[in-house]
Amino acid sequence: MLLLVPADPLRPRHPDAHFAPEAHAAREARVEVAVVDHDALARGDDVPRAVSRVTGQGVAVYRGWMLRSERYAAFADALARRGVALRTTGEQYRRAHELPGWYPGLAGLTPRSAWTVGTRRADFDRARHALGGGAAVLRDFTKSMKHHWHEAAFIPDLDDGEAAWRVASRFVELRGDDLVGGLVLRRFERFTGAEVRTWWVDGVCVLVGAHPDSPYDTPPEAFDAALVSGSVAALGLPFVTVDLALRADGGWRIVELGDGQVSDRPSTVEPAVMVDVLRHGVG
């Protein structure tokens, strides 16, 4: 296995500080590590140069900052021309990274959702009516603005079209050029306790731990990832994270699914443990 991590912008031959512990642990485990220029990948202006320091061949796993789906596909293509195959294809990355890709397979396990393509008011109103009345949480295909909860995330009543649109407009303003896909409305469900982050390789849960936002809140002993294993496996995705939370009525619900390559590691999970996760199914 070849591990690819972003380069430090100031020291381009070295891993970015955020991913350096995983790179070090990988080398300790005799896994080859190479750096890529994430900024160039994100811009899409010189992808061959961005991967020019990748000299190994074979199957690779990326551990780095998020990329838009089209940028990841270009990344995968550039590596393929160098004899390197990302374990996660461009199509698989899009399905994991963007909510419309994974939602249909998990619809019964996650809050009901409706979305637009683009940010037109008419499309937003159609999605709002499709979801029905009540409270909702707003996001785009990849991210919410939960840190701006009342102004750009939470909609108390979908029947109040003007108030809902004010939240959506503020969300669009704050996301700016980073907005991905369109506007997603998710039925608001009340959760208790911290989220649990689970890591899956080829449909098998290989690690259960805390969420990066609450790294010291360990999962309850009663938590069992088997509750969602069949549905996650059926997605056919090679490496994903699934975040779950306990609903107020006592049922576990999927809050988010993401591509494991760009999912953050909680500070309480040792880098060597993450390397073991990465090696599942590759060696």
Image (cartoon, helix red, strand yellow):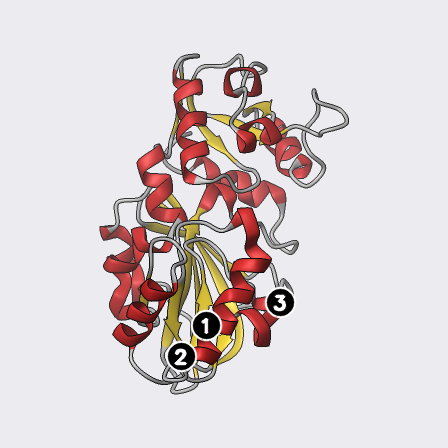
Q: Which residue is mark 3?
A: 147
Position in image of residue 91 (x %, y %): 31, 37
Task: Describe the element under mark 2 as helix, strand or loop.
Answer: helix
Position in image of residue 245 (x %, y %): 45, 72
Position in image of residue 123 (x %, y %): 32, 63
Given residues 29 and 171, the one toward you in this image is 171
Mark 2 / mark 3, whichever is N-terminal: 3
Q: Is residue 8 visible?
A: yes
Where 84 falls versus 146 (above or below)? above
Q: Residue at left 57%, top 24%?
A: 30
Count the marks: 3
Which one is closest to the eye, mark 3 or mark 1?
Answer: 1
Q: Could you classify mark 3 by the number of other residues whose Cα lies within 10 Å: few (under 14), some (14-19), or many (20 or more)?
A: few
Q: Could you classify mark 2 by the number of other residues whose Cα lies within 10 Å: few (under 14), some (14-19), or many (20 or more)?
A: some
Q: Could you classify mark 1 by the number of other residues whose Cα lies within 10 Å: few (under 14), some (14-19), or many (20 or more)?
A: some
Could you say which quadrant of the image residue 273 lies in?
A: top right
159 relative to 147 in the view: left or right: left
Task: Describe the element under mark 1 as helix, strand or loop.
Answer: helix
Q: Tag 1: residue type?
A: Trp
Mark 3 / mark 1, whichever is N-terminal: 3
Q: Which residue is mark 2?
A: 161
Q: Which residue is mark 1?
A: 165
Q: Tell me whether circle 1 and circle 2 mark residues in contact (CB < 8 Å).
A: yes
Q: Tag 3: residue type?
A: His
Given residues 166 and 66, the one toward you in this image is 166
Q: Looking at the figure, which quarter contains the C terminus?
A: top left
C-alpha distance separating marks 2 and 3: 23 Å
